[in-house]
Amino acid sequence: MAASLWKNLLQTTKDRILQILQQRRASLYIGAHGYEEELIKKKLQQFAGGSINLSKEDSGIGILTLNNPKLMNAFTGTMMLELQERVTELENWKDGKGLIIYGAGNTFCSGSDLNAVKAISNSQARWDEYVHVYAKHLNQTYEKTKSINFGYKTLLCRLPLISVALVQGKAVGGGAELTTACDFR
Ligand SMILES: CC[C@H](C(=O)O)C(=O)SCCNC(=O)CCNC(=O)[C@H](O)C(C)(C)COP(=O)(O)OP(=O)(O)OC[C@H]1O[C@@H](n2cnc3c(N)ncnc32)[C@H](O)[C@@H]1OP(=O)(O)O
């Protein structure tokens, strides 16, 4: 009898845990400050356009180009994802010494893509929530700061490369803040 009760309790507990896990998977948020990484990435992927290009020169200088000139190099969702990939690539670059960031065309960066900001603002979660969530990937101190701009900053600041923002034309919003993430501008 006791054994059977125990078995039932065990099974019920397992079922409940599985149920909770499934619910969490369906939700953007996990716990108070955790987030569903894949959901965030999928959401950011919906706002495509532009690119973040990296060329690594033999001299040890990396050149990172913010490339979305039609929108004054505004940051789309996919550009955010690419930024993280490029920075990871730079982190692993053994011969890297310095980094120059500049914008394609005649401008630096006009911040977040306002089309994405507007689109997301009309849906369940706001753009800045996604962006802040994504900043968590970029910035381990997210819990303290909750700011993508600080996320950019920490991401670039922690790079063991001397970084320079080569600002030509406009640097607005998140674009201006990105310049402050560099050692020189
Ligand atoms: C605050 C931080 C936050 C974050 O990321 O956390 C943000 O960054 S929110 C975004 C803040 N940025 C802005 O509000 C900038 C808005 N844009 C402008 O003020 C101007 O476009 C400017 C000053 C950057 C350039 O002005 P200019 O007269 O030289 O050019 P146009 O305005 O004609 O722009 C050309 C073309 O680009 C489009 N555009 C510019 N910025 C953005 C943007 N951030 N998102 C989406 N699209 C942008 C603009 O609409 C024009 O498109 P067109 O189809 O040719 O009309």
Image: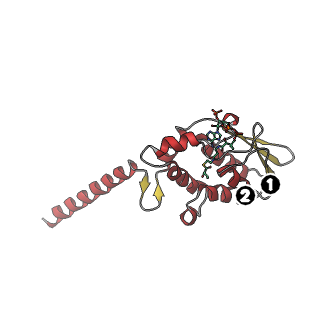
Residue 115: x, y in percent?
56, 39
Which residue is found at the position 51% from the left and 42% from the top? 118
What colour-coding does the image apply?
secondary structure
- Find disc 2 in the rendering and name its residue: 180
Which residue is found at the position 47% from the left and 58% from the top? 34
- Give, as a three-letter code, the residue at label 1: Arg
- Give, as a three-letter code, the residue at label 2: Thr
- Find disc 1 in the rendering and name its residue: 185
Q: Is residue 155 left or right of residue 24?
A: right
Residue 96 visible to an observer of this rendering: no
For the residues labelled 2 and 1, say whether their Cβ atoms are less than 8 Å apart.
Answer: yes
Q: Is residue 68 left or right of residue 1?
A: right
Residue 39: x, y in percent?
47, 46
Residue 46: x, y in percent?
52, 37
Which of disc 1 and disc 2 is earlier in sequence? 2
| Quadrant holding the C terminus | bottom right
Residue 69: x, y in percent?
70, 36
